[in-house]
Image (spheres, rainbow, N blue to C red):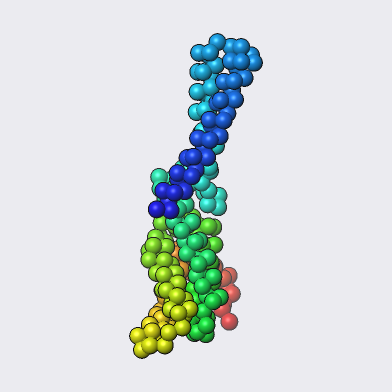
Amino acid sequence: NRSADITEMNNNRQTFFATISSVAAFIGLNFIVEWPIIIAALLSIGIFAGVYMISKPKLKIGNLDLDSLKNGTEIRFLLQEAEQDLISIGEVSKKIDNPVIKTNAESLFDTGVRILNYLSENPDQISAARRFFGYYLNTSRNILEKYLTVQKAKLNSAEINNIKAATEKTIPMLNIAFDRQFENLMKNDILDIESEIKLLETNLKMEGIEKT
């Protein structure tokens, strides 16, 4: 599990820095300053706890502090996995020979990047993007990676040709799904723009200014 691996790595880093700091403090207090061993040990334990907390990595997306959110760590993992899926889609798209699949794969990558950029600026929408992250993005990556494996095999059986044809039909559908997911995420922004336009039109009408 990638989420568990990242958590363990961060915990190990915190423990390492805290241990080094507390050991250095104990040696300095007990052997150099010559404080009583019990006092030196207690202060070292306090230093360990302090450094451990200070070295905890800050989880932020845009201006939002994820530490303040109940599911902040989970959100960060969602974004990290999404970035890995996108990187893979981008790399695979460069190696695909079929022009239709290649063009659509590049389009998937571009839309995916725009969605991630939007979410970075609007982190409150990340929870609404779970289906995009957990299904559409990951499924696109799997299909394209498997297609590339088939392409590299250079087989020409009826079954392989059927797989290629099915992929050629499926990828454009995924592009439509990506676009719809993006539209759903931006629904509030779209409604805000429509409201602003209607309000502006009403005010202009009251001032005797009509649309041309």
Q: Residue at x 43, y 53 (%)?
A: 2
Quick one: 37 or 70, which is closer to the camera?
Answer: 37
Quick one: 140 or 202, which is closer to the camera?
Answer: 140
Q: Residue at x 47, y 76 (%)?
A: 148
Quadrant in which the C terminus is drawn: bottom right
Q: Is residue 29 left or right of residue 75?
A: right
Q: Position of residue 171 (x, y in %)?
A: 43, 79
Q: Residue at x 50, y 84 (%)?
A: 98
Seen in the picture, residue 78 relative to 148 is either above or below; the reply is above
Looking at this rendering, what residue extends furthest in the right direction?
A: 32
Q: Is residue 98 visible?
A: yes
Q: Is residue 72 visible?
A: no
Quick one: 69 or 88, which is closer to the camera?
Answer: 88
Q: Quadrant of residue 211?
A: bottom right
Q: Position of residue 209 (x, y in %)?
A: 59, 74
Seen in the picture, residue 181 relative to 53 is either above or below; the reply is below
Q: Quadrant of residue 166?
A: bottom left
